[in-house]
Image (spheres, rainbow, N blue to C red):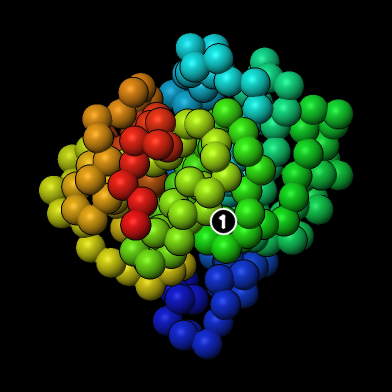
Amino acid sequence: MSPARDTTMTMKEIFTRIYQHNGWGNSETTSGSGSSIFNTVAIRRELPFVIKELGVRSMIDVPCGDHHWMREVTLDIDEYIGADIVPELVERNSRTSGSERKRFCHLDVTRDALPRVDLIFCRDCFVHFSFADIRRSLQTMRQSRSIYLMTTTFTGIEENYDIDTGDWRPLNLQRRLFQFPAPLLIVREHGIWDGGEDSDKCMGVWNINDLLVS
Ligand SMILES: C[S@@+](CC[C@H](N)C(=O)[O-])C[C@H]1O[C@@H](n2cnc3c(N)ncnc32)[C@H](O)[C@@H]1O
């Protein structure tokens, strides 16, 4: 499915349609095969260590998708906020996983103000965004005055190319146009899906103040 081809659709409409029609076609999770229990072994294992190492007490998981694998992670923090642009996902996550320390909210990472937290966790998000929407997201992240960003990067990609928001392509955030410095920490994920595998898929951690945000 490539709903981004219809240029009249808003971001919210694009991703709501993907959610409602299970557009990423995985039987286990509406967030796509990258979010299956199998494909999240490394991040589920390593995230608690990253949180401890960085001294994180609060985090926003944006986008949180259907919270399928994250609900399996024991987070030793005071505050977890899951946020997504699809209201139905947020309502469902609140109903099934909300608690005193865990809440969910509806938010567009490219436009809305983000809360100030220790860690912005942003997995499998920018790979679906145009360069312009990534730039807007980095601006909202910087404006939140949060400390760390942990996000998806593909270390083997030499050159990044643009897409319509809603499609997918791998991105190396240390290459043009982003030029992130070497990450403070890196978790190697190894995604396997119907069409192949991503042996260079990683979650990198950066100090947001170290990023070039134009
Ligand atoms: C591939 S899923 C990844 C979900 C989650 N990070 C994970 O690892 O399972 C991408 C998610 O991004 C959400 N999304 C897309 N655009 C967004 C935006 N502008 N703001 C917040 N969430 C957005 C979609 O609704 C979808 O749930």
Residue placed most toward the observer, 198 or 60: 60
**Residue shown at 62%/74% (left/top)?**
13
Residue 176 percent across, percent down from the top left: 19, 53
**Is 110 above or below relative to 193?**
below
Identify the residue position indicated by label 1 in the image.
109
Can you say whether 13 is above or below 63 in the image?
A: below
Q: As rendered, which of 70 and 103 lies closer to the eye?
A: 103
Residue situated in front as seen by the camera: 206 or 143: 143
Residue 46 image position (x, y, % from top left): 47, 18
Instruction: Determine the residue positioned at 53% across, 61% down.
Output: 110
Q: How many marks?
A: 1
Q: Which residue is drawn at 23% across and 45% down?
A: 179
Residue 99: image location, x then y, percent: 85, 31
Instruction: Report the side of 177 relative to 186 (left or right).
Output: left
Residue 87 visible in the current orientation: yes
At numbered mark 1, what does the secondary structure look like: helix, strand or loop?
A: loop
Q: How crowded is mark 1: few (under 14 residues within 10 Å), some or many (20 or more)?
A: many
- Percent position of residue 157, x then y: 18, 46
Name the amino acid, label 1.
Val
Q: Does the residue labelled 1 lie within 8 Å of ligand 1?
A: yes
Please say whether residue 168 is visible from this viewpoint: no
Q: In which quarter of the image is the C terminus?
A: bottom left
Who's the residue at 39% across and 59% down the image?
135
Taking 167 as reference, is 119 left or right? right
